[in-house]
Amino acid sequence: MNLLEILGYVGSVIVAVSLMMKNILNLRWWNLLGAALFSLYGFLVHAYPVFAVNFFIAIVDIYYLIVLYKKKDEFSLLSVRPSNNYLKKFTEFYRSDILKFFPEFTFENLEGKKVYFILRNMLPVGLFAFEIKKPDAAEIYVDYAVPTYRDLNNAKFLYKTEPEFFKKFGCKEVIAKTDIPAHQNYLIKVGFERADDKFVLKLK
């Protein structure tokens, strides 16, 4: 197998993998990379139909990436009662995915906690629940984003754009406890710092 064949295989594999991604932004970036490589392969081996189709796909990906980055989403928080029927359906629908990050989660344990949907352009794309563990700290029970909108923007809104949300409860810090590596990485990315057996975000 020569380098050109390897280039063609790599490009086609990346395109195929990109189509399995749930996050649309990641899908566009990886699809762009795969289409660009496959387009280059088509050009170098004089397979011009292959070059033309993948070059067009790359241009389309670039266009939609520009649209995605220019688009300004509107975020808000919607308080819901733990007995809310839609909340129950939401947690049932995403239950297996929620448990990947919050293995101890149950709908019944939402009782007594402050529960909110994170709305993005009026769509419920995240579930956030916490309780006040001490006078000045909020401890997270669940901070879940649906797969399609798992791009950290929900968290940036919650922890950086809306710090007054926690302060109205008298909180000076937010605490999270988790043994899940993916969730630990998420917390660090959004500004939490490890402190013994927990992660802490100091509110400014």
Image (cartoon, grey):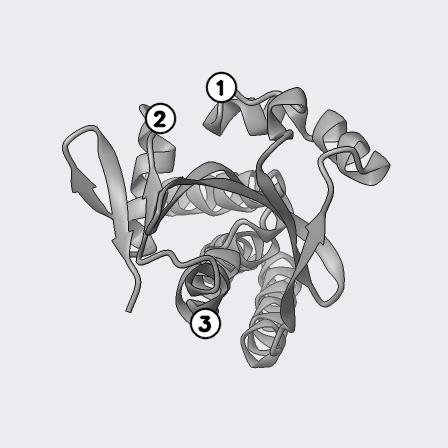
Q: Secondary structure at mark 1?
A: loop
Give the residue displayed 67% in from the left and 63% down from the top.
Answer: 120
Q: Residue most toward the front?
A: 135
Q: Could you give the CA–CA distance between mark 2 and mark 1, rounded to whole angstroms?
A: 9 Å
Q: Nearer the viewer, residue 68 or 125?
A: 125
Nearest to N terminus: mark 2 or mark 1: 1
Res. 129 image quadrant: top right
Q: From this viewpoint, is residue 93 visible? A: yes
Q: Which residue is pictured at 60% across the width and 78% down the height?
A: 72
The C terminus lies in quadrant: bottom left
Local crowd size for mark 3, using a 10 Å CA cut-off: few (<14), some (14–19), many (≥20): few
Image coordinates for residue 183, horizontal then vertical, percent: 38, 35
In percent of the image, x 62 and y 48: which residue is there?
Answer: 126
Q: Marks 3/1: CA distance?
A: 28 Å
What residue does disc 3 label? 161
The label on residue 103 is 1
Mark 2 lies on residue: 180
Q: Position of residue 24 (x, y in %)?
A: 61, 55
- The amino acid on which the numbered mark 1 sits, given as a three-letter code, is Pro
